[in-house]
Structures are given as structure tokens and as C-alpha cells.
Amino acid sequence: MPHTSKRAEADAESLLAFLNTLAGLQSLDDQLVELVKMVSAITDADRGTIFLHDDTTGELYVRVSEGGHIPEIRVSDEAGVVGHVYTTGVSLIIPEAYADSRFNPEVDEQTGYRTQSILCVPIRSRRGELMGVAQALNSRSGRFSQHDLDQLELVMQQASIVMHGSVSVARLLDSQKKDAEFLHVVAEISSEIQLGPLLRMIISMVTRMLSAERSTLFLHDPKTSELYTEVGEGLGATRIRFPHDKGIAGTVFQTGETVNIPYAYADLRFNPAFDRQTGFFTRSLLCVPVLNKRGAVIGVTQVLNKIGGTFHSQDEIRLKAFSSQIAVALENARLFEDVQNIKNYNESILESMSNGVVTFDAQQRLVTCNQAGQRIFGVTANEIVSQPAAQFLGEQNAWLREKLQRVETERKAAITMDAELVVGNEKRSVNVTVLPLTRSQRDSLGSMVLIEDISREKRMMSTMSRYMDPGIAERLLKAGEEILGGQSQMATVLFSDIRGFTTLTEELGAQGTVTLLNDYFTIMVDCIQKEEGMLDKFIGDAIMAVFGTPIAHQDDPDRAVRAAISMLRELGDFNALRATRGQKPIDIGVGLNTDQIVTGNIGSPRRMDYTVIGDGVNLASRLEGACKQYGAHILISQNTLDMSRDTYRTRQVDAVIVKGKTEPVQIYEVLDYHTEDSFPHMRDVLELFRSGLDLYHQRQWDKAIAEFEHGLELHPHDKAARLYIERSRTMKLNPPPDGWAGVWVMDHK
């Protein structure tokens, strides 16, 4: 197994372990502490920071930070580097912080820390909503790489799923606390918690205690700038809406001042149209504003017709007191409704989870089990509620009961990976996390068990995603597991290799070599996956990829050729960037062959790899190696050329017999990636080369040499022409035997 594959596997295991640890933590703060450590670890940064977004203030703030104690920092969600990343949703790598106009040096002044380089990525929820920004400062290796950015984005993508749930739980707990306060206030008035009945009861109490004939509550609609009746004693089904600056109610709403009118029709502010609309005759009127806890007017309470006289100052005091209760009731009832919505939302999330979630109380009796848990255990909710853990889990799962007991005693999370869960006569492979549930006073509420069923499909998905885009892997899984058992199919194999890599490694050293390979592989693999090819493996600095397996396309040879051309073009851009840094260019060779190959999971029971084998694979590798001999960058076989649907700029360079074979293979050089600068006078040179090759096959050595030399005058760097000049001179001195067909025997791999 190549070192890079081992590293990828180690990274995946590390990420999985980190996510399990993250999910096992009790609070959002604890999760953020671990997340910040992970940011620093995976990017090799001196410091990591998580900025969360405060929706109420429009700010980004630091909740935890690694690298020493610092005071809390709050910045506008549009300010600085983090503000830029948050508002644009685009990750950034800044090699020199103080040279970037977006960097705010005041943060360094505030913390006493010196920022040099910055890596910053957005944090998104599962639904794509921006939650904040993750930032790594000062790469210990000197410069953050694209690999660092990719790794950090991957960690944030996965961690945000856990964080989003923790944020939701935190909000739910906060809302439940506020809801409890609301229920306490409501209990002082009545046992009714529904907004409509509650307000009707309050208004009824107002009417009765103030000895009035009618009471009305007008609420403000900011969307329409109107006041409307929510509850009106004696109005029946009548509802009234009017501009928020009209009438007595409008005056009170605008000024926030109480109005007490002993004779309504004698006051010019009174609008008799309401009486005509309702059929009621207003004599006296008392109207007070309804203020929310921020002191803003949200409506008015109006009482009509004091029985036996007019409203006095004591009535004003009583009505203000009742109105304050109305404001509390309104806000708390709406909050309660929001809490219910959040609760329903979180329950929906819980039910939609593929992992089982089972909760037990402090006496280890089952409280809840979501649908995934019911599916895993093969039960229904009615069968298991209040069952003791020992009865629910059974004797065969004693290990899980022991974990429950230990978590209940120690109040610490416990994680078990790839454990065996026995359900009936079936054994399931599961990952289990047991978490303690506590009150704010640390009193035990019981335990929660998270169960991930590691099905064969998940195992296959994990395996296949290492080789190809996850979307392709998902399509493959739908085709069935038997495809991994081995099959023979037509496919195009691609090999590429860096020229002079050993010399490069000696110059770059270990760290520079790893950085170079990471940057190089990122570019090359993107070219392969854009054409939906499967990355088979990295072999040192070499790449092996396959087009046509495990999912075939009608144009797989074209996809492979286009990928090779793209690799050379992207390499040109990469080398141009390296030149600006004073670094040497990279040169590669690519070999392609289309043939019948064998695919499947190959290896030992302890370690399997999905790969391809066969003579067609070997020939692609030989063609990659032959690029050096012909001075080519892309060589393809006759099979690949014949099965391609598109037209490419190619030339036949030879007919060869590879080591271990007896039949010759025609090989062609693909030249589409060249520019006029890299291959001048291409049309004329190719025509001269084709003419020279025909003369070579006709044994007209001198004429062939003349054609090749003419081509070299137009393109002095054409190594293939020089090769055939040398061969022609050799053949002239040592003529080949009769029956010679111009075939060259490759005696090396």
C-alpha cells in the first residue's frame, strides 16, 4: 500500500475518531474546545479560532480560542478577513496577513498576538446556512497549503453536522427555560396556556374587575402599519383593522401615553365609525399602551363604558397592570409556540436520523427510542416504553448494560467502535456512544445511547469513496454488492509519473516533497474526477486511474484522453506558478491503453482494495515509461485511438512489442495540449515525420533521415525525430532481415 493511501486512511480514521469525540461531548463549549484543537492539528497552525455568528447583533465573536487566554473579541460580520469569508462564503489562504487589505491589525493589538499567515473557511449547517468561520493562524511550516484548506473544509463540513445539533439543543434548553418562566406567569392568572383562550380570559377579567361593558385588545401589525383586534369582549366574530395613527387607539399607540375620556363623543380624537361598524354606543373610554419588555409599544388595551360612572385613576393603574400581564402573556405565548416549533423540529431531526437514539432515565428504564433505534432493535415504541435496560438489551448485550452503568456512575461519555450488537438471532456491527444526561445542577437525568449500524452498504460506501467521487460511489452501490466480487470489462487505464522525481526529492527535502506531491496530486486528481474516472492508487509519485469501471460510459476512452490532455495543460499553469516562486518545473509522462481488464476487491480478509489487473493494465504502464524514449508526454495505444469517438491531434510514433508479449502494438503520441510556443510549426513537422516514418518502413534510410532532419529544423526539440535518425543510421549499417515490419522490441518495462 502506498504511503499516501495509508496517510489518507489514517486521516479518515482520525476524522472519524474526532467526530465521535465531538458527538460525545456534553455542551457546545466543550465541542468548540475540541474543534479548535483539531483546527490547529490538521493545519499545523500555531493557533486556531472559531468565530460564531450572533444573529441578534450581526457580529462574529470568539467563544473559545487556543494558544493562551485572550479577552472575548467581537467584530462586525462584514469586517476583516473573517467578515469577508462569512459574507462571501468563500475560503481564503493569506500567506502575509499584514500585506492583505482585509486584515484588521487591531485584533493583534487587542490580543498581543502577531499574525503572519491566515487560513480561513466558512462553517455551514447541513442546510447550507452560514454558522460562523474557522480560522487557523501562523502555519508552523511557514505557509498554508491547498491541502490544509481542503482538510479544514472537510472537518468543518462534518463537524458542523454535530455542532448544528448542539446549537439546536442549546437553543431548545434555553427556550425551555424561558417557557418555564412563561408557564409560571400564566399559572398566576389561570391554567390556560393557549394564547387565544388565555387572552380572552385576561380581557374578561379586565372587563369584570373594572366594571366595564366591553374591553378590546388592539395589536400592531408592522407589515401593514395597522392596529387590529386580537381579543375583544363583546365583539363576537367581528374583527377590526385600521391605520395605527387613527382614533384613540392610534393616538395611544403613537404617543405611548394613557388616554382617559369620560365622554367619548365630546373628544375630537374619537372616531364614531367604530360604533357604527359594531353597533355599540361608547360613552366613556380608557385606553393604555401595551409595552413589551424592551419598552416598545406593541398594541393598546381599551376599556369602554364604566358602569355607574367614568373611569378614574385607580382604574388606570389596574388597567396598566393588566396590560403588562397581557404583554408578558403575548411574548411568552409566542415564545412557547417557538419552543414547540423548535421541539418539533428537533424531534423531526431525531426521527430522520439514520442512527438509533435511545434514552434511559436515572433508574435505567427506557424513556424514548427513535425510529432508527426501533428498526435496529426490531421493536415498536409501545412495546418498550418503561422497560428496564436489562430487559430491553438482553443478556447477549451485557457489555452495553455495563457501559450504561459506568456512564451513570462516572458521568463521562463512553464510545465503542465496531462492536457486536445481538438482536434476536441477528448480529449487527455497530458504533456505540453512551452519554450522560444531567440537569444544570449536575443531577442525573439518565443516559442516552447513540447507535450507528455499520451495514454492508456503509462499508461499501466508505471503501468506494476512497477511489471516486461520492456521487459515483452512491450510484455504484445501487448496482449491487456483487460488482466488488470481480468482473471482466472493457476499460481505459491511465498511468502518469513525474520525471526526475528522485532528484527533486533530494533538493526539496522531506517536508518540501510532501507539500509538492499534495499540490500536484490535488490538481491531477481533479482532472481525472472531472471526467468521472476512478483513482485506483498513488504509487509514490505515480498515479493509476481507470475509466470505465466500476461504472462504464460510452465514451470512456475519450474521457481518459481528455483527462490526460487536461493534466498536461493544468501542469503548465502549475509550472508557471512555480516559476514565479523560483521553483523548478515538473515534467510528467502519461500512458493510456484500452483493453479487457479484471476488476474487484483484491487482498486479504484484513485488508481489501478495489483495483484492476490484467495485460491491459501492464501495457498502459509500459506506455507511460516509453514516453521518456520518444520525448512524449502522452502515449496511447491503437486500441484507445480506435475506440475514441473524438478527433485528436496525434502521430504514430512506433509499433512495439512489449516485454513478455509477441504481438506488436501501434502507439501514438497525443499533442493537443501543445501551444505554438511549445511545438512550433506542428502541422509541417507532423507531415515531415509521417513521411520520414513511411520511408523508414520502406528501408529508404537516407531519405528518411532527410525528412526527419528537415522536421528538426522547424522543431529542434522533437526527440522522436532524433530517435528515428539514430535508428535509420543503425539500420543502414546493419540492415534488418527479410520480413522486417518496422517493429521495435521493448526489452525493458
Image (cartoon, rainbow, N blue to C red):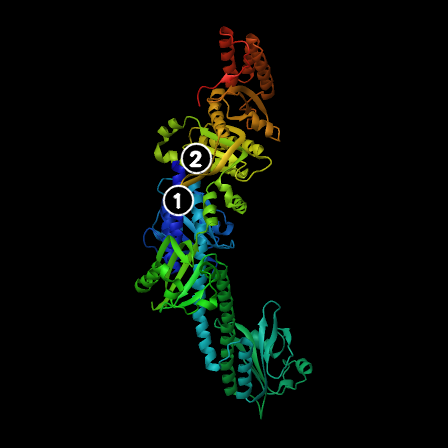
Compared with 286, 644 (above or below) is: above
Label 2 SS: strand
Quarter of the rendering occupied by the N terminus: top left
At x 38%, y 26%, the residue is 503
In front of the other: 201 or 126: 126
Quadrant position of the C terminus in the picture: top left
| Dot 1 amino acid type | Asp
Q: Which mark is residue 11?
A: 1
For label 1, the SS is helix
Mark 1 neighbour class, 10 Å CA radius: few under 14, some 14 to 19, many 20 or more: some
The residue pinned by badge 2 equals 538
- Looking at the picture, tell me which residue is in the foreground, 512 or 306: 512
Residue 409: horizontal and vertical position, in percent? 30, 64
Q: Is residue 437 visible?
A: no
Around disc 2, counting alpha carbons within 10 Å, would you say few (fewer than 14), some (14 to 19), or many (20 or more)? Answer: some
Left or right position of 112 against 191? left
Q: Is residue 132 above or below residue 300?
A: above
Which residue type does callout 2 highlight?
Answer: Phe
Which quadrant would residue 687 be assigned to in this image? top right
- Residue 60: percent from the left, percent from the top? 44, 56
CA distance separating discs 2 and 1: 16 Å
177 up-or-down from 601: above or below: below
* Figure check: 227 above or below 380: below
Instruction: Pick whichever, 351 or 258, lies toward us.
Output: 351
Q: Nearer the viewer, residue 717 or 253?
A: 717
What percent of the width, then of the height, locates residue 398?
34, 60
Tag 1 or tag 2, which sits nearer the N-term? 1
